[in-house]
Amino acid sequence: MGLTGLEIYKHLPKTNCKDCGAPTCLAFAMSLASGKASLDACPHVTEEGKAALESASAPPIKLVKIGTGDYELELGDETELFRHDKRFFHPTGVAVLISDNEDVAAKAAAFEELEFDRVGLHYITDVVAVKCDSGDGAKYKSAVETVAGKTEKAMILICEDPALLEGAVEVVAARKPLLYAATADNYEKMVELAKAKNCPLAVRGKDLEETADLVEKITALDYKELVLDSGARDTSKVLADLTQIRRSAIRKRFRPFGYPTIAFTSKEDPLEEVIQAGVYLSKYASIVVLKASAKEHLLPLLTWRQNLYTDPQKPIAVEPALYEVGEVDENSPVYCTTNFSLTYFIVEGEVENSRIPSYILSVDTGGISVLTAYADNKFNGEIIAKAMKEAGLDEKVNHKKIVIPGHVAVLQGTLEEESGWEVLVGPREAAGIPKFAKETFG
Amino acid sequence: MAVEIQKEKYRSKVGEVVLGATKEQGGSRSHTITVGGETTLPFLHFEGEMPNRPVVALEIVDMVPEWHPCFGQYYDDVFADTAAWAKKCVDEYGADLVQLRLQSADPDLKDSSPEDCAATVKKVLEAVGVPLIVIGCGKGEKDNLVYPVVAEAAAGENLLLGVAEVENYKAITSACMANQHNIIAQSPIDINICKQLNILIAEMSTAMINRIIIDPTIAALGYGIEYTYSIMERARIGALQGDKMLAMPMIGNIGFEAWRTKEANSSTEDAPNWGEQETRAILWEATTAMAYLQSGMDILVMRHPRAAALVKQNIDELMQDNSY
């Protein structure tokens, strides 16, 4: 990644032996540069050549995994500063903090409830952080055990005294918790523990420079499963540090910052925490840790994460189907729209606002909006009539009336011909649906 | 080890727009508010200037709105009195400015006359000292009759008047030109239409270029926020790289959008797995605002007092210097 074909070519044997399947070494180099081939295909590349290419082609931000099984969380391996340049890949882990001084069992049980269904998606709060505030190794170990018994999600163990931490790690090492944190004072012991237990390790300096220093020292001890914390806790400073870490890693390939990041809220009020966490989530944190743990606190934050990490080039679609809004019966109105999720859910919300139980036929347009689909000939009389038949509309309602979006009023004639139904032209914008419904069906 | 701080140098900046006018300036505001002027992306004080903090407006309507019942405890005593409502927003809830929607002009609602609308604007101007944003009812034909009358009645006050769209911008632009007001230029989540509209307004009067606030048409959290977020980031980067037709401050109707969502309105009983309604709704609105602050919004029009307070606090914190 990032290397040109010519740069790669320098490290190849330049014998044009064709063993890799490419006609020349240069052609192979070009394929490597564009990601179409793998270096493994060349049996003759020297170890030095391989090492040089691998280190130069390592991703700018290392992929680090915490947790195991269904709840393994992939962090880092991002390539962009702005989602519009391509996309963000690995959604920020949202972690809820539990102190070993509070009612651990109750809070862990509440944490496990922080899963949500909205717009056909399932959101989970994916990390639980257990913090040693008691200064008591046995108490901390038992807190970690309790949490581990309540949830299978990824864990962060927060305890900077390696002696206290060791007992707790013992219990959950197999689940690959993130150990927090190695600092200037304890890093040697922390690295030893992380290495022995094969757990990823957070590194916290008091500022960017000390953090970079620590990373250098730790990588010199041959440990690279790291997550960075610059030590900042003020909103503005954290935003600046996260931006610097991301920019240095991606633009300058500055190795000490080529790792995922973790940020902590500093607020006590849960609403303020959510907003602060939202800033960090927007600007590059790989994990945010907060104390807030009520459903109404987490849902907005997880929704923003879901939105931010969608692929800007891929429209999000809902299943093309006949949806029911409210207690429908054979007299209920029928609306149709496309299966672009945004369009569909806005229409659904407004139909709901009309307070008249209705059907919505979501027509398969490959997940694109009404006007785009119309322009692309993916939303026309024939296609809508076919979707009506497939959905069995004839048997669902005893009237033969369907509402189409106002923007495609032009489809009225062909759809009437194709379906034999009366076609009503709805409002151009979904916001007009409640009024339209009141006047037409009220 | 030495860490090389990565600083971006942009060649241009966002223009500044002044809202309101004091007595000396020909108006009656107690102070003016300046927005824009950024020379870098939001809150990156370590590499550029953000001379004016983003501001929070609270929205009011000139008729009793059909808002969620949870607003009753804040506004029940003032819903029917637009001027008192404006005053409460400023005095009690700390609004930097107020946005008045002339909803009653809607021919399908009260069909208030342009003169009635102008009288309401005058009353609100008398009640508060902050700069005022005034927007129409959304029915273009009627709004075009209202703009000139309101603009003339408030001449000298340097209002922010909206909204101009590509299909309907001439009447409002003329009204603003004739009476020295600022204008909201709204485009449908589309950078090219945004530029096109700014050019159209500038063609009517080059002086208006420095009086435009861009409304990129925002979506709420969960309903396409990421589209507007990215459009705004791209527009702002374009502005900083020298595109004059994108170099305007940005505004968004956050309260209006957030409170249309199911997540804000569903009762705790109807959606038990989403948690308590009012807190959920406050955070739905405030999280939407938080995201838009990060993509460059300068004027955030909000609805819930607590959400507005959360966002003002977030702005205060983000405005703290973070240079190295």
Image: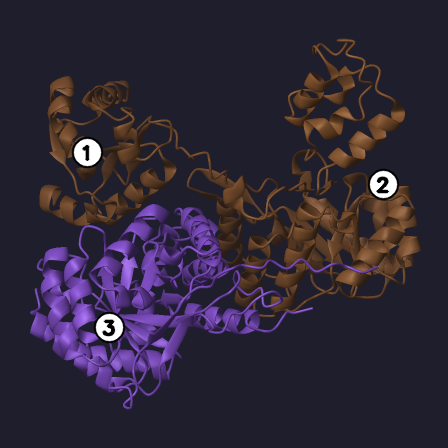
Q: Are marks 1 and 2 on the same chain?
A: yes
Residue B305 x %, y %:
39, 72
Circles 1 and 3, Cβ within 8 Å, touching? The answer is: no
Q: Quadrant of the C terminus of chain A?
A: top left
Compare marks 1 and 2 and give the one earlier in the sequence.
2
Q: Identify the secondary structure beneath mark 2.
A: loop
At 84% from the left and 57% from the top, the residue drawn is A213
> Which residue position holds label 1?
A408
Q: Are marks 1 and 3 on the same chain?
A: no
Circles 1 and 2, Cβ within 8 Å, touching? The answer is: no
Q: Are marks 3 and 2 on the same chain?
A: no
> Which residue position holds label 3?
B181
Q: Amino acid at mark 3?
A: His
A22, above or below B309, in the image: above
User: The numbered mark 2 sits on a residue in which chain?
Assistant: A
Residue A403 x %, y %:
17, 34
Q: Nearer the viewer, residue B1 or B203?
A: B203
Q: Nearer the viewer, residue B58 or A48?
A: A48
> Which residue position holds label 2?
A198
